[in-house]
Amino acid sequence: MKEIPFNHPFLVGTELGYVRQAAEEGGLESGGPFTARCETWLADTTGAKRALLSHSGTGGLEAAMVLADLGPGDEVIMPSFAYPTMATAVVRQGATPVFVDVDPRTLNLDPTEVKKAVGPQTKAIVAVHYGGVGCEMDELLAIAAPTGLTVIEDAAHCLLATYRDRPLGTLGDLGTFSFHHTKNVSSGEGGALLVNNPALLERAEVVWEKGTDRKRFERGEVDRYTWVDIGSSFAASELTAAFLWGQLEAAEEITGRRREIWNRYHEAFAELEAEGLAQRPVVPDGHTHNGHLYYLVLPTPSARDAFIAAMRAKGIATSFHYVPLHSSPAGRRFGRSVGDLAETERLSSRLVRLPLWTGLDSDSVARVIDAADAALNDVASSRA
Ligand SMILES: *Cc1c(COP(=O)(O)O)cnc(C)c1O
């Protein structure tokens, strides 16, 4: 029986031609024509004031933390149920991550917990939109507004997903995408920073250009370029941009295909949820997801482990995440938590992700559904 991997890269077919074109045209450093195409597409498609293409989603987050002007003594509120790099990006600035719990329905920041964590040291909030389903942004923005907290969206999962008709990544001051191998649209490694707050535009260019005013020099606004601020080499190579351009051109199609798979899983597991065997993702009214990932939350940690083993026995790879940041070695060393984070602990030990990738064919989806159905029923009857 053919194995069904958890993830498998998808090639549109145009990527290598664009890479060849970039190489033949020369100038493979950042800022070439493919970079411009990708950045224009991202800004036009999302409505961001400016999109800057990065070597990684992590790079985008690190630049965001520089632009938020974080330093020692500052605190940044974020979910514990998340990928580590936004916390690392905060710690690199000498600031402190403050971990709070998530809403068990969406696995996104719980605004009530955020409110409890806001104090005089709070400088920013990082909203991670889990699985391409948006956080309650109106509530988070309302918490941030009175004291002018910077709101950063970790929209790594979110290309083409929306919240109340507004694209994710454009609701906060800054937003970041990832084009990592596992994301919907990919260049192996890659990412972008969306700048939405116009007050940050000028500094963003400088931070991006290693702390120099090179962009102004290129526009002929200054007669030489020099070191003016802190920054780093956040940009993507033109090779990465060329590959990514092939994927971005097909982004709608890729997203449509993933949504189809997501919807099939979701319909198929409705009955299991009604029987109490697993909890399905919740997409609140007014949100449009992008089929980034599909997960189930099982009743107990041992049920989750038995499920993963049963799926593996049928040649189907599943996966789980995240190890809560508040209890991770670096999280304990560099951060602190507010609240008991009970939902984060519960979800982290019970969540399982099913294979979902753009080239996953219909028969394989049916096989995953049948195997999951059987495994969940077996797990339930062994507990009875
Ligand atoms: C993938 C991911 C990142 C990191 O992106 P890279 O491109 O791998 O650096 C950050 N946050 C979340 C939620 C992610 O899923």
Image (cartoon, rainbow, N blue to C red):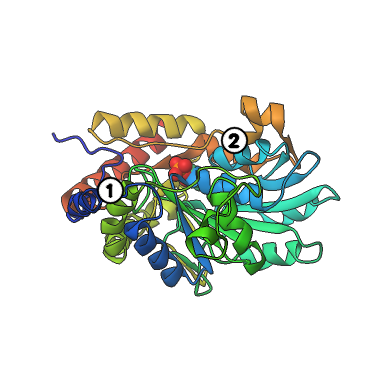
Marks 2/1: CA–CA distance = 28 Å
Q: Earlier in the sequence, mark 2 or mark 1?
A: 2
Q: Which residue is drawn at 38% across and 67% down?
A: 41
Q: Is residue 194 above or below residue 126?
A: below
Q: Which residue is drawn at 18% across and 51% down?
A: 361
Category of crowding for the residue at label 1, using alpha-carbon neighbours closer than 10 angstroms: few (below 14), some (14–19), many (at least 20): some
Q: Could you say where residue 141 lies in the image, as x and y percent from the top left?
A: 69, 65
Select label 2 or label 1 by which is in front: 2
What amino acid is at disc 1?
Answer: Ile
Q: Is residue 326 above or below residue 176?
A: above
Q: Residue furthest left?
A: 1
Look at the numbered disc 2 and say if its residue's Cβ is closer than 8 Å to ligand 1: no
Q: Which mark is residue 369?
A: 1
Q: Residue furthest front?
A: 223
Q: Residue furthest bottom?
A: 165
Q: Could you say where residue 209 lies in the image, as x and y percent from the top left?
A: 53, 50
Q: Name the residue under label 2.
A: 324
20 horizontally vs 111: left or right: left
Q: Residue 258 carries which label?
A: none
Q: Could you say where residue 327 lies in the image, as x and y percent from the top left?
A: 64, 30
Instruction: Count the marks.
Output: 2
Q: Do the residues labelled 2 and 1 touch (CB within 8 Å)?
A: no
289 horizontally vs 96: left or right: left
Q: Could you say where residue 220 lies in the image, as x and y percent from the top left?
A: 51, 65
From where the camera sits, is residue 107 visible? no
- Badge 1 marks a residue whose secondary structure is helix
Name the one closer to the observer, 123 or 355.
123
Q: Residue at x 75, y 66 (%)?
A: 145
Image quarter for residue 105?
bottom right
What amino acid is at disc 2?
Answer: Pro
From where the camera sits, is residue 169 visible? yes
- Badge 2 marks a residue whose secondary structure is loop
